[in-house]
Every structure is written in C-alpha cells, then in structure tokens.
C-alpha cells in the first residue's frame, strides 16, 4: 500500500512538472530567435472611423534581468497593436518610447513587439480595451506592459 502511494505521488509530481514545463516555453533560456522582421500594416487612413493613442515603453531588461541583460532598444524594433488578427497600429521607437495611434479596433487590443536584436516576437500578457478618443500612458508615465515570447 505504501509503495502504491509512493508511485501515485511520483506520477502526480511528474505530471505537475510536465505542466510547468509547458508554461516554461514562454520563458526560454534565451530570447534569441530567427524571426524575420514582420510586415505589419494598418488600414488606409480614409478607413478610420475611431482611434485612440498609446505611449508605450518596452523594457525587456527590467522585466527579465537575467535573460535580457544585454537587451537594448533598436531603431528597427516594431510595436504593433492588434484587434484580433487585424493590425490596428504600428510604431517604431522614438527616444525610448513607442507612440501608437490605434484605429478602428473592434475587440480588445493586444500589443506585439518585434525585437530586431533578438530577432524574435513578443506579446503583452494583458489586453487593453479600445475606447475611441482614449489615451493609454503618457510621456511622463508610459504604459509598460509585460511581454512574453510568442510561441512559434
């Protein structure tokens, strides 16, 4: 009976560890990938019926000090806003911040970040509601989302 309980406990522990390992796929030992720079595009200006803005700071070094200790913002980095699968805003860094105009979102907003240094895609853990004429973050207090590696 005691041996049977030990086997059951061992199996449960292994199943738990396997589940944790799956979540670990979002936290690789290295953020370095081989993803080409995305070609995210936003609908033409004449299609806009509503918009909002966001001032965003990406700081992988602060979020992952061990894994991203060498990370630096790069002029070729891209931040994009998505409403479902539709790209509704893009921005390149400007003095350490991303200034996004988000247009015609029908659902919540998801932020995706491409790191030219790591050649990898990241996605914000949190989604944000779209509200016409709203503003997320300011220059003094930018929105600082937590990003995870996009599973490829």
Image (cartoon, rainbow, N blue to C red):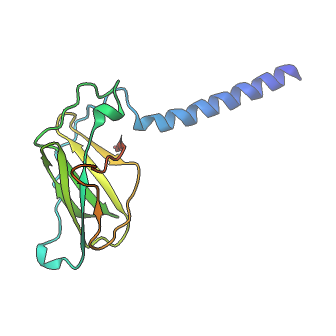
Q: Residue furthest top?
A: 3
Image: 133 above or below 72: below
Taking the image as shown, residue 115 lies to the left or right of residue 25, namely: left
Give the quadrant of the N terminus. top right
Image: 5 above or below 132: above
- Mark count: 0
Counting from the top left corner in percent of width and height, residue 139 is at 21, 51
The residue at the point 18 percent across, 55 percent down is: 99
Q: Which quadrant would residue 13 be assigned to in this image?
A: top right
Q: Tell which of 133 and 42 is nearer to you.
A: 133
Q: Residue furthest right?
A: 1
Q: Which quadrant would residue 85 be assigned to in this image?
A: bottom left
Taking the image as shown, residue 115 lies to the left or right of residue 105, namely: left
The residue at the point 33 percent across, 48 percent down is: 123
Q: Tell which of 146 and 31 is nearer to you.
A: 146
Counting from the top left corner in percent of width and height, residue 58 is at 26, 43
Counting from the top left corner in percent of width and height, residue 4 is at 83, 24
Image: 29 above or below 115: above
Give the quadrant of the C terminus. top left
The residue at the point 28 percent across, 25 percent down is: 69
């Amino acid at each position: 009976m005691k041996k049977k309980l030990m086997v059951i406990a061992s199996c449960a522990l292994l199943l738990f560890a396997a589940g944790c390992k799956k979540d670990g796929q979002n936290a690789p030992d290295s953020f370095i990938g081989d993803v080409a720079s995305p070609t995210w595009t936003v609908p033409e200006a004449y299609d806009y019926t509503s918009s909002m803005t966001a001032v965003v700071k990406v700081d992988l070094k602060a979020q992952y000090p061990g894994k991203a200790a060498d990370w630096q913002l790069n002029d070729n980095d891209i931040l994009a806003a998505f409403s479902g699968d539709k790209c509704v805003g893009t921005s390149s860094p400007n003095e350490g911040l991303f200034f996004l105009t988000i247009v015609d979102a029908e659902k919540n907003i998801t932020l995706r970040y491409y790191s030219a240094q790591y050649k990898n895609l990241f996605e914000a853990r949190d989604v944000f509601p779209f509200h016409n004429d709203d503003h997320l973050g300011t220059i003094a207090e930018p929105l600082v989302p937590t990003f995870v590696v996009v599973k490829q």
